[in-house]
Amino acid sequence: MRLEELKQHIRDVPNFPKEGIIFKDISTLLKNKNAFKKSIDVLGDKYERDRLDYVVGVEARGFIFGAALAYRLGVGFIPIRKKGKLPYKTKSVTYQLEYGSDTLEIHEDALHKGARVLVVDDLLATGGTIKAVVDLLKHLNATVVGVAFLIELQFLKGKDKLKDLPIHSIIQY
Amino acid sequence: MRLEELKQHIRDVPNFPKEGIIFKDISTLLKNKNAFKKSIDVLGDKYERDRLDYVVGVEARGFIFGAALAYRLGVGFIPIRKKGKLPYKTKSVTYQLEYGSDTLEIHEDALHKGARVLVVDDLLATGGTIKAVVDLLKHLNATVVGVAFLIELQFLKGKDKLKDLPIHSIIQY
């Protein structure tokens, strides 16, 4: 499968999660074995020479791409989870959403100082979540080598919020 | 890494999620590249001749093992999610927990009739969640080839609830 074909496997679902939003459904890509494999291999090829220690995935869809990519790269996987889900001592970050706020957590011993990490999530929209994740990782003195997304919604200008970071996406709208 | 060594990478966290429970923390296994790879390869070797169409993973920790295993096997990945998270039309199942109930969903067009699937989750405890997942898959006329767990808590006798299913776990307590 060619990289350009991946976009055909994303399904538009109108009015989800609310009226007026067109949701990019990745489940149709995941269930296609060639599209799923291609999306992981593209990222694997890109980052395999970056001497990564870990791939960091954000709950929940980031776990799907993050874990498969960690396996492909032969590195460890670190989950960042919603508040209250990780069992051990955590560091947390609270960030603003359009309405209200959300909190993400990482185990305080998840990684060593200077660990080279790649952050993976399915979708870059406004960038708020990923900015919070990167702040959390810097707080633990990790080195964020890159931030990778399956999809980037360029019209939401998330990259502006993450301008010091090397961002990569596979599919753009 | 030998299979017997995987257990050393599971951390016991006392009193999580509530007093008196000893939680099996898998994050310490995930972050160890050799242990994570071994856990996926063991399952990959076991199921690679079963002509699977899909690996099905249960939100959220099941996404980690399920997606990496789907990649390893070269098959598609299907997520089963908590209520309200999947964007397209769904089939749902509600099942009893110790206190209250929970609902899981799958896209109604997630798979074709007769599709050969492997269900993956991190932990088999009482088996209630997995029984609900298997019921959901049978409702969509899938063929459940197997159910695989990283960890099985044998003293909770989850296998008794799933007795017609070929269950496999890597680590037992």
Image (cartoon, coloured by chain):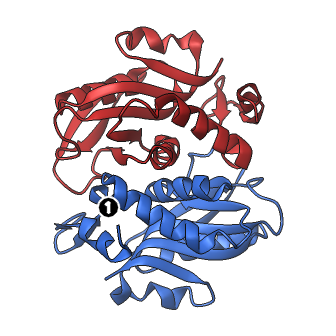
Chain colours: A red, B blue
Q: Is residue A168 above or below residue B133?
A: above
Residue type, label 1: Ile
Element on which disc 1 rests: loop
Q: Residues within 10 Å of mark 1 (few under 14, many from 20)?
A: many
Q: Position of residue B151 (x, y in %)?
A: 39, 74
Q: Quadrant of the C terminus of chain A?
A: top right
Q: How many marks?
A: 1
Can residue B88 be seen here? no
Q: Quadrant of the N terminus of chain A?
A: top right
Q: Position of residue A42 (x, y in %)?
A: 60, 32
Instruction: Using residue B80 as the reference point, say whether residue A50 is left or right of it.
Output: left
Residue under mark 1: which chain is it in?
A: B
Residue at mark 1: B26
Which one is in front, A35 or B60?
Answer: A35
Instruction: Using residue A78 as the reference point, say whether residue B109 is left or right of it.
Output: right
Which one is in front, B163 or B88?
Answer: B163
Q: Is residue A132 above or below residue B13?
A: above
Can residue A31 be seen here? yes
Which one is in front, A137 or A99?
Answer: A137
Q: Position of residue A139 (x, y in %)?
A: 18, 29
